[in-house]
Image (cartoon, rainbow, N blue to C red):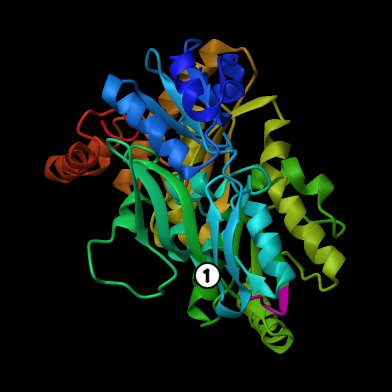
Amino acid sequence: MREELSTIVGGEHVTSPPPSELEDASVASNVRARDDALLVRPGTAEEVAAVVAWCYERGVPIVPRGGGTGFSGGCVPTEPGSVVVSVDRLRRIRRFDPFLWRIEVEAGVITADVARLARENGLYYPPDPGAAESSCIGGNVATNAGGPHAFKYGVTGAWVTGLEAVVAPGELVRLGGPTRKDVAGYDLPALLTGSEGTLGIVTSVWLRLIPAPEAALPIAAVYPDVRTGTAAIEQILASGVVPAAIEYLDERVVEASRGSFPLGELGRGFTLLLEADGTAEEAERGRDELLEAAREGATALHAPTAPAEVRAFWQWRAGVSHAVTAQEGGKLSEDVAVPVDRLAEAIEETIAIGERHDLTACSWGHAGDGNLHSTFLLTPGDTAQLERADAAAQELFAMAIRLGGTVSGEHGIGLLKNGQLSRQWSAPAVGLHQAVKRALDPKGLFNPGKKLP
């Protein structure tokens, strides 16, 4: 395998790395890569196609890999003799038209680099997943990644106008492109977006951009309890203001992270993080209206205005997950989502589920989307604790479905949640998923064991 694949991509780009180089963030949940996988790093889309064709002809499992920042085991090889196809060498900006608000980037381009290039040219690429400094655009598309600003601006798929991908049995296809409107065929770019590498490998993406907001002004509003805080969310939505972000931290998360809050004493209690953006005038007016809508029941309000304070505010929010992990050294965190009007129930039930399994539980997340990061704290190496956390996660999934939500609002199904679609969707609906898989991947070689039951 090594010799033949080396003729396609070069010997230095075919390696047998240690499993640690093939794992992702799901390693905390004991998801381990096989030690017999080959890592192949094509340098062009044509080389990706040639590698896929080689694998497809021989029945070799193909595992696409981006930055390796996922939480679901989606890029981890679990089948014998897999070839892991990394896109990390596909780093070209193929085309950038700032005056037309569009860019085409290869799949290995880092998410934050796209955002920076856009900003340097007065433009804005809104999707901001937590691992933006190390995740790849291809992986963002494969998982339809979101982030705090998805409430106003949408997830990654909302910004994709076209893509190039390698599909079975090794064909390089272009779907969509720079055209902003196209209803000529089935929405195949949308089908591949969020497919988690089970239908093909994305090699480049056309993204639309928008003019950058002149100003963005955040707010932290602290409330005595969950019910008061979630009631404030409904008041905010009813106010008519469209926040750029509506985040929440429950009381335990606040306690873990408030010591590093950059604006002085945050306070104790359930906390909402809001942001208004637009022109300087629009942002100021929106912030004032958000403050008024959030005021009822609040015990503290913080509204930084200096650019350095605003940057520090969101850097602090980005570090919340690490602050939570530091409490006991490890955690198992799930990304269920529910309708916004059921958010309080889901937050409270997360705590109750933890108590039933003798685990410390907490949650934070994207309140405007009803997206919780329901989390159970763990002591590293405590296998009994991890087993209880796995059982608790099953209860979380059942709770999300019962409340009319989903088992994954952000991270995808991957390996860890394999089989959960059968709980959320009816048998005919799951059958449609399987029919799509068979049509695009008749041999079942693209990321086997992931996403579909």
Residue 212 placed where, x, y %?
Answer: 66, 75
The answer to whether residue 304 is above or below residue 100 is: above
Looking at the rendering, the stretch of residues picked out in magenta corresponds to: 211-216
* Mark 1, secondary structure of its residue: helix
The residue shown at (20%, 44%) is 436
Residue 246 placed where, x, y %?
Answer: 58, 64
Numbered circles on residues, count: 1
The answer to whether residue 105 is above or below residue 118 is: above
Q: Which residue is mark 1?
A: 152
- Asked if one can make out residue 407 in the rendered structure from this viewpoint, the answer is no
- Asked if one can make out residue 336 in the rendered structure from this viewpoint, the answer is yes
Callout 1: few (<14), some (14-19), or many (20+) C-alpha neighbours within 10 Å? some
The answer to whether residue 185 is above or below residue 240 is: above
Residue 324 appears left or right of 61? right
Residue 155 placed where, x, y %?
Answer: 48, 59
Residue 145 placed where, x, y %?
Answer: 50, 51
Residue 349 appears left or right of 327? left
- Asked which quadrant contains residue 122, the reply is bottom right
The residue shown at (70%, 45%) is 320
Q: Nearer the viewer, residue 436 or 236?
A: 436
Under mark 1, the amino acid is Lys
Q: Nearer the viewer, residue 212 or 387?
A: 212
Q: Residue furthest front?
A: 7
Q: Residue furthest bottom?
A: 281
The answer to whether residue 341 is above or below residue 38 is: below
| Quadrant of the rendering where the C terminus is positioned | top left
Residue 401 colored magenta? no
Q: Nearer the viewer, residue 56 or 392?
A: 56
